[in-house]
Amino acid sequence: METKTKILVIEDDKYISNFIAVSLKKEDYEVYISQSAADGLFMFSSYRPDIILLDLGLPDQDGLEIIKELRQFTEIPILVVSARGQENDKIEALDMGASDYVTKPFHMGELMARIRVAERALSLRGGNAEETIYKFDYLTVDYEKRKVLVDENEVHLTPLEYKLLLLLIENQGKVLTHNYIIRKIWGYEAAGDNKSLRVFMANLRRKIGKGDSGCHLISTEVGVGYRFLEE
């Protein structure tokens, strides 16, 4: 019997939570609803969902604190669905460990697409641990031989560029903030050095791009970070 994906919705607005629940159930997801942070954390420990949809403006605790708390012991996808639409709000949530961010009001189609991305990330995490070669579009990465090929032609990346490419592939479909990438690539002491990141990203894009058409595999989220195209 096929196992349904379990989604926990932590949202205090009953209209929105009901709307999301009905829409998800139509798509055959198993849905749990919570209207407070405390209840949401209890339901997480009780039902062990696969994905969490999280509002930030909860009555008893800020959603950012929930992300921080959950990230101490779980890496499951957390999709923020919030009315806070400022760039800094998104960066803060993503830096704390949110997997993606959808601003209210939203189209259900967009939210479903983000959920499918999270499901694919879960699938990759659980099933491709032994994968030694990554292929997508014209790009091939041979992890064992540490080779990167564009249309079967090898391109030479510096160690940092290679590390940056692997980080993006590992998180394909997900927005990675500038600070997150800098911490992962250079370490905490270099946090905030966006200029270096821009230079390395430009070089990486040029090397894995295709002639005048450039590299469409990496998109820029203006003011936030970068996203590697999902398969």
Image (spheres, grey):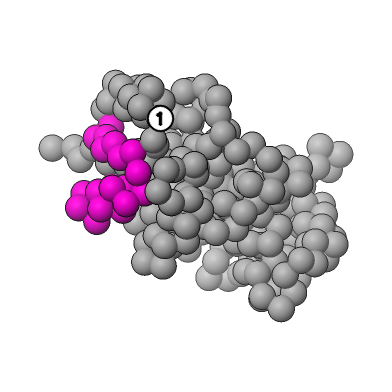
Q: Which residues are magenta?
A: 29-50
Residue 51 position within the rendered picture, expressed as x and y whole percent measured from the top left? 36, 45
As drawn, 131 above or below 120:
below
Q: Residue at x 47, y 61 (%)?
A: 68
Report whether 157 appears left or right of 19: right
The type of residue carrying mark 1 is: Asp
Number of numbered markers: 1
Was residue 85 drawn as part of the magenta stretch in this picture? Answer: no
Nearer-the-camera pick, 135 or 87: 87
Residue 196: quarter of image? bottom right
Q: Is residue 208 visible?
A: yes
Report whether 226 appears left or right of 119: right
Residue identified by numbered label 1: 13
Q: Residue at x 52, y 57 (%)?
A: 97
Looking at the rendered structure, the secondary structure element under dot 1 is: loop
Nearer-the-camera pick, 30 or 116: 30
Was residue 41 drawn as part of the magenta stretch in this picture? Answer: yes
Report whether 21 appears left or right of 167: left
Report whether 152 appears left or right of 16: right
Residue 2 position within the rendered picture, expressed as x and y whole percent measured from the top left? 19, 37
Q: Split into 4 quadrants, where in the image is the N terminus?
A: top left
Q: Is residue 136 visible?
A: no
Instruction: Residue lying at the far front in this picture: please name it.
Output: 60
Q: Residue at x 38, y 22 (%)?
A: 15
Residue 115 position within the rendered picture, expressed as x and y whole percent measured from the top left? 43, 37
Crowding at dot 1, Cα within 10 Å, few <14 / some 14-19 / many 20+, comes out as some
As drawn, 31 above or below 19:
below
Q: Residue at x 53, y 37 (%)?
A: 82
